[in-house]
Amino acid sequence: MKGVLYAGATGLFLSLFLTPVFIRLLAKRGYGQQIRDDGPTAHHVKRGTPTMGGLIIITSVLLAYFTSHFLAGSDISSSAMLVLGLVLGLGTVGFVDDWLKIVKQRSLGLTARQKIIGQALVAGGFGYAGLHFVDKFGLAPISKHLSTVRDTSLVFAGAIVIIWVLLLVIGTSNAVNLTDGLDGLASGAAIMAFLAFVLIGIWEFRQSCAYTQVAKCYAVRDPLDLAVLAAAFAGSCAGFLWWNTSPAKIFMGDVGSLSLGGAIAGLAITLRTELMLIPLGGLFIIITLSVIIQVLYFKITKGKRFFKMAPLQHHFELSGWGEVTIVVRFWIIAGICVASGLGLFYAQWVVR
């Protein structure tokens, strides 16, 4: 359990004090954010704000995770390493996207097709590798069972599992990417999701079938180490949020949003709580649905818009809401969704 505290505290400390150093470095090199001309006019003042802050989050997570193991003297797990591999892979896709935006001095980097292909390759590798590395209890990091709040009786072939993992990872990473449109919105909502996974991992460890044979025990590989990793993400995002909150001194960029989305999906998959992504990532889903509705309505009505602008946060901006008001209210929605998800998780345990 000490590892969870070490990881969270180290991630918080590192991101809190490394971020301003990174801000000065990026500002000196002129690596600033490009702003869409068709977006809210209030965002134009943000042009040139240092971006790619996700690099600090990822660095802090890596250092925090390995430092916690050094201090606690615990073993590194295959499950956590696979999730970290997923994060690094998606972070690389996001970094290329951010870098092209800076080099070309425009708000578009990789094409949508290029980005999806990159995400699919990384997610596919994660899904394939996750079906291997079986431990002495016969558990692999990724189960072939469909999971809700735990594994169900539905079992799929390996190829189907990989396709399912692709959908979850690509969907979640893009959902976080769409949410990252206002100062602190995505990082604040991500913190809540990661804290939920900390609690879930600790609970599954205490009720693990590997160590206890109580009714409804959890057949999950490495739940405690995944909780340590989730704590590292929560702490690192919290430290980054100090500088990312309005008015933001730095943006996380696609390198941050894609990797955080991948981390959330990876933790849900390896903790056998795949469908818990719906409540735990409720805000991300709502914002993604707003984009889908906008696109479909635009095509059906041949040019009319359902929202003033999508994603949803920009609709409220154009409706006259202040940025901080939107972020705080959306955080409240995210908190309600996460609390509901944890309630569903615990309710499944207590209902006999």
Image (cartoon, rainbow, N blue to C red):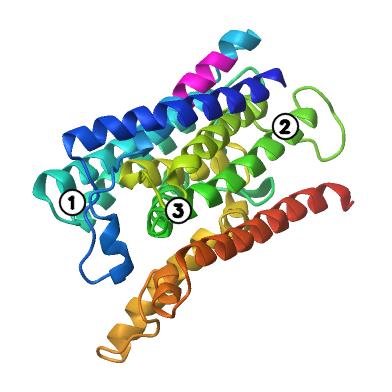
| Distance from the alpha carbon under mark 2 to that under mark 3 | 33 Å
Q: Position of residue 141 (x, y in %)?
A: 55, 30
Q: Is residue 302 above or below residue 283?
A: below
Q: Within the magenta stretch, is there residue 31? A: no
Crowd class of label 2 (few under 14; some 14 to 19; many from 20; radius 10 Å): some
Which is in the foreground here, disc 1 or disc 2?
1
Q: Position of residue 46 (x, y in %)?
A: 29, 56
Say what amino acid the circle numbered 3 marks.
Ser
Q: Main secondary structure of the magenta part?
A: helix
Q: Residue at x 45, y 23 (%)?
A: 62
Q: Say which residue label 1 marks.
A: 109
Say what amino acid the circle numbered 1 marks.
Gly
Crowd class of label 3 (few under 14; some 14 to 19; many from 20; radius 10 Å): some
Is 116 left or right of 147, judged from the image as shown? left
Q: Nearer the viewer, residue 77 or 174?
A: 174
Q: Nearer the viewer, residue 134 or 300?
A: 300
Which is in the foreground here, disc 2 or disc 3?
3
Q: Which residues are magenta?
A: 61-68
Is 307 left or right of 194, judged from the image as shown? left
**Residue 328 image-quadrant placement:** bottom right
Q: Secondary structure at mark 3?
A: loop
Q: Say which residue label 2 marks.
A: 202
Q: Secondary structure at mark 2?
A: helix
Is 270 left or right of 246, judged from the image as shown? right
Say what amino acid the circle numbered 2 marks.
Ile
Q: Say which residue label 3 marks.
A: 246
Counting residues from the start of the chain, the first of labels 1 and 3 encountered is 1
